[in-house]
Image (tube, helix red, strand yellow):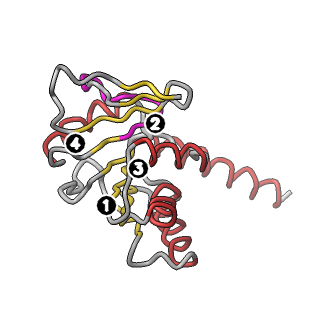
Amino acid sequence: MIGLHIVLGVAVLALIWTYLSTLWGAPWARTSLSRVDRMLRLAGVQQGETVVDLGAGDGRIVIRAARRFGARAIGVEVDPLRCLIANVAIRVLGLRGRARVVRGNMFAYDLGEADVVTLYLLQGTNRQLKPHLAAGLRPGARVVSHAFPVEGWTPLAVDREQRLYVHEVGSADPSTSTRFVS
């Protein structure tokens, strides 16, 4: 009987934790590694660039950007448990100095160093984040979003199958057309 109470208690805590994460921006959902690779390739991540993942979760985008693409990668995550999990993985993989996940508010994080920002958030969160992205990123920085575009910005590239959208800050040229990739 005690075991049943423990299981029920853990289940209730997990549900509460999941609900709270939606209040912070989006429920946590893993992104497949193949989709992470596609996001980073579509954004044109180059060795030595800085990738910032807003809502980093378990750090898989940060880890992949550092390991596969040679980027300096920073994740911003409000959930202290996910920050811990991500930073333990980063340490185990020997990526300290090239990758890290910081506990923080993505709406307040300084984006001035970012060459690429990755997002896997809800449409409403992207909408709220748009002014912060516009004000904080330098011209030429790219934003790659999974599932939802940044409303009002014309994407440079769209992968319809993977539901990925790449935007470039400062590319307000109306002659710029969207490139659809498969």
Please state the extent of the stretch shown in magenta in the rendering. Answer: 144-153
Earlier-in-chain disc, 3 versus 4: 3
State yes or no: residue 152 in magenta: yes
Residue 126 is inside the magenta segment:
no
| Image coords of residue 139 (percent x, y) | 15, 44
**Along the viewing direction, whichever of 36 and 104 lies nearer the viewer:** 36
Structural distance between the alpha carbons of marks 1 and 3: 19 Å
Q: For this view, does 101 lie left or right of residue 115?
A: right
Of labels 1 and 2, the one closer to you: 1
**What amino acid is at disc 3?**
Gly
**Whole-percent x, y for residue 11 in the image:** 68, 49
Q: Pointer 1 and pointer 3: residues touching (CB < 8 Å)?
A: no
Query: Circle 3: is it few (<14), some (14-19), or many (20+) Cα within 10 Å?
Result: many
Separation of marks 3 and 2 at Cα, in angstroms: 12 Å
Type of residue at label 1?
A: Glu
The residue carrying mark 4 is 133
Residue on which disc 1 sits: 49
- From the viewer's side, name the closer residue of 112 and 129: 112
Element assignment for label 4: helix
Q: Which residue is denoted by mark 2 in the rendering?
A: 146
Question: In the drawing, what numbered circle is on residue 19?
Answer: none
Callouts 3 and 2 close, C-beta under 8 Å:
no
Q: Earlier in the sequence, mark 4 or mark 1?
A: 1
Dominant secondary structure of the residues highlighted in magenta in the image: loop
Marks 1 and 3: which is nearer the front? 1
| Numbered label attached to residue 55 | 3
Q: Earlier in the sequence, mark 4 or mark 2?
A: 4
Earlier residue among tags 1 and 2: 1
Taking the spot 20% from the left edge, 39% from the top edge, the residue there is 169
User: Do the numbered discs 4 and 2 sit on residues whose CB atoms are within 8 Å?
Assistant: no
